[in-house]
Image: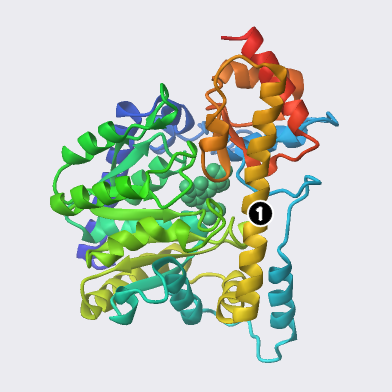
Amino acid sequence: MDDTIASHLASSAERRLSTLSHHLTGHSASMASEIPISALSPSATAGSYGGVSSVFVNILQAPEDPILGVTVAYNKDPSPVKVNLGVGAYRTEEGKPLVLNVVRKAEQLLVNNPSGVKEYLPITGLAEFNKLSAKLIFGAESPAIRENRVATVQGLSGTGSLRVGGEFLARHYFERTIYIPQPTWGNHPKIFTLSGLAVKYYRYYDPATRGLNFHGLLEDLSSAPPGAIVLLHACAHNPTGVDPTLEQWEQIRQLMRSKGLLPFFDSAYQGFASGSLDADAQSVRMFVADGGECLAAQSYAKNMGLYGERVGALSIVCKSSDVAGRVESQLKLVIRPMYSNPPIHGASIVATILKNSELYNEWTVELKMMADRIISMRRQLFDALSKRGTPGDWSHILKQIGMFTFTGLNSDQVAFMTKEFHIYMTSDGRISMAGLSSRTVPHLADAIHAAVARIN
Ligand code: KET
């Protein structure tokens, strides 16, 4: 291997380990328990190679993921009344996973297409999918698209797109600190730390008001170093369900631009917050309209129900098409040794739907139906708690936006609800409203009522 590449790789690996251990010791106790420091350095191997003892004997049992592990526990529970409100995955009124009709139709078209092949895609993915994805998030009339200054690559859903963006920034951007909201989706600190960035938090949520800590947010971003990267949830903030208003977004934008902070949008719920794809992309479009640069990671897991297809995109909006071309060339160098090139099927489904106006319209109707069902679950849960006279103000259930309600229940109350009522949810008190149905609302309300009455 070329010496300079070898030393670059060695130093970036060192940086990752040191930022990760810095992060573990500095910031998040919960994360420290998930990735023991000892797991990051080579473990001493077993003394014997005689076939009796494994060379992996010193490997520690890792804990389950705080979100996906909830499903593992749920699957093991034989109770007929169990409910999984952990992972953010849409369920029908019957509690079943949903494949959108429009997705089935697109798949039929793909199966019947005699020229459909299974060749490798380019490193950057399906070109048509990339163009359509950029249009979906930035808007058909976006000047950045018209001026050809957006570099878009297909990613492995939202997670993979965030990771590629993180690694690109760690390699090529001068300020390697990323600020993420407190709290945020539990995978964010891990993705960015392992990308080689240093993770810091900005205040976001105020438990006292169950709303945005706007003052704290502005203060923390004001004191971030010039150029720092800032992770923003485009809409339907996970886990809090609390989004800035458009006026607040405008203030955030002005502050960030005046300080030269680099926005990195995570858009995992476009269309799920309001039911409108355009309304949910407003925050991102504001930052693109001012002519400045930004990154955006998109996921089609929720809004097209393509969870397991792992389809998403990373776009980097640049100042000129010349820069965008060079950025894309470097993204290819991040992707090629990571997974070579992305899978073809999910991206073909998305492209088929986005390019056909009839299918596109059908998609928006199905999307709105999912968003409306979630909103109606909010009303039903709120009414059920009111009917029971459950102590406390539960109006945040109605006010919060998107897939989740951040209930304010503590981890002991959650553990009680799981043990006594077989209700599975993350220990931070987050409920996936998309997993709820008219049938399960009374059971959940009973559980919350009992938890609040018995445990402080
Ligand atoms: N960003 C956010 C904010 C997010 O909530 C998720 C998934 C993702 C990105 C990544 O999704 P992907 O499937 O990679 O496109 N969140 C849900 C699922 C999970 O944790 O993986 C969740 O919070 O339940």
Instruction: Judge whether 54 appears above or below 293 on screen.
Output: above
In the rendered image, which residue does mark 1 sit on?
A: 370
- Asked if residue 434 lies left or right of residue 268, the reply is right
Given residues 148 and 407, the one toward you in this image is 407
In the image, residue 124 lies at what x, y percent? Answer: 43, 74
Given residues 116 and 234, the one toward you in this image is 234
Please tell me in which quadrant of the rendered image residue 134 appears: bottom left
SS at mark 1 in the image: helix
In the image, residue 16 lies at what x, y percent? Answer: 31, 45
In the image, residue 96 lies at what x, y percent? Answer: 78, 49
Given residues 195 and 316, the one toward you in this image is 316
Q: Residue at image x 18%, y 54%?
A: 257
Quadrant (top left, top right, bottom left, bottom right) of the N terminus = bottom left
Instruction: Judge whether 273 appears above or below 63 on screen.
Output: below
Please tell me in which quadrant of the rendered image residue 74 appears: top right
Counting every numbered tag in the picture gives: 1
Under mark 1, the amino acid is Met
Given residues 428 and 111, the one toward you in this image is 428
> Would residue 24 be visible to someone looking at this image?
yes
Crowding at dot 1, Cα within 10 Å, few <14 / some 14-19 / many 20+, comes out as: many
- In the image as oriented, which residue stretches furthest toward the bottom? 115
Query: Mark 1 near ligand 1 (CB under 8 Å)?
Result: no
In the image, residue 146 lies at what x, y percent? Answer: 32, 81
Instruction: Judge whether 42 appears above or below 451 on screen.
Output: below
